[in-house]
Image (tube, helix red, strand yellow):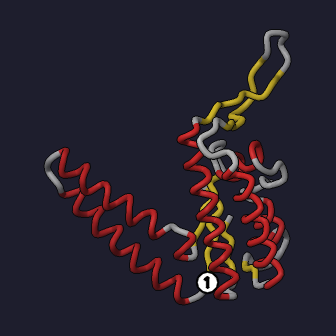
Amino acid sequence: MGMDIYLEAQEFKARREKARKRFYHWVQLRDEAKGVLEKEELQKQVMKWFEIMNSGKNGFFRVSYNDYSISYWLQYNVDEKAKGDWGLELFYLAVKGKKSPVIRSERFRQELLETTRRWYRKAVKLKDKKTYLVVGMERSKNGSLVEKKLVISGKRTNWYIRWLKDLVVFAEQAVRTKSSIYVSY
């Protein structure tokens, strides 16, 4: 489960559909392949088209709800207010209690771009450094509950930074196209 965020402009719908068709084409080829090496090579194409299909460049961004999501990573390493009740706080607050999960506000798009760029500027300072996530609670030696922290390697931190960059690209596309933003949570 997660929060899926789409730009509704036709340009993005068409791009996502084209990528989706290529993704499923490569999935079928991979699934029909006989050898392990052939399957591994085809899996690379599957992953490539999955990432293209689900990219900010194509008007899509996904925030999972698990402990390893971008919203938790941001909360613990970049901005403690980034994570909300469901996914990223700024999207959640924009649609919370509304009849429609569609955001049409130019002001919101501008704030989204400013916020994501600010997060990204802070995040790039963490490049190649260890960061952390909280993945539950545990008992300390004295019996009290404390956060259970998971150290994230520098390589994995860089992966989160790339994920965040994709959100910046999404925000740039939203501003450029003036597209409505659909939030599914």
Residue appearing at x 85%, y 18% in the figure: 144
Q: Point out the image quarter for the N terminus.
A: bottom right
Q: Quadrant of residue 85?
A: bottom right
Q: Secondary structure at mark 1?
A: loop
Residue found at the far left of this picture: 34
Residue 136 vertical placement versus 101 (above, below): above
* Residue projecting furthest to the front: 125
Image spot of residue 50 (x, y percent): 42, 63
Query: Quick one: 4 or 162, which is closer to the camera?
Result: 162
The crowd level at tag 1 (other Cα within 10 Å; few <14, some 14-19, many 20+) is: some
Specify whether 182 is left or right of 118.
left
User: Percent from the top left, x then y, of residue 175?
Assistant: 70, 82
Tell me the amino acid under the disc marked 1. Answer: Glu
Whether residue 16 is situated above or below residue 51 in the rendered picture: below
Spot occupied by residue 3 in the image (x, y as percentages of width and height): 65, 62
Q: Residue at x 80, y 60 (%)?
A: 89
Q: Is residue 42 left or right of residue 143?
A: left
Height in image: 142 above or below 171?
Answer: above
Q: Which residue is mark 1?
A: 8
Toward the viewer: 129 or 73?
129
Q: Residue at x 34, y 60 (%)?
A: 46
Which quarter of the rendering shows the C terminus?
A: bottom right
Residue 13 rendering spot, x and y as whole percentages: 51, 83
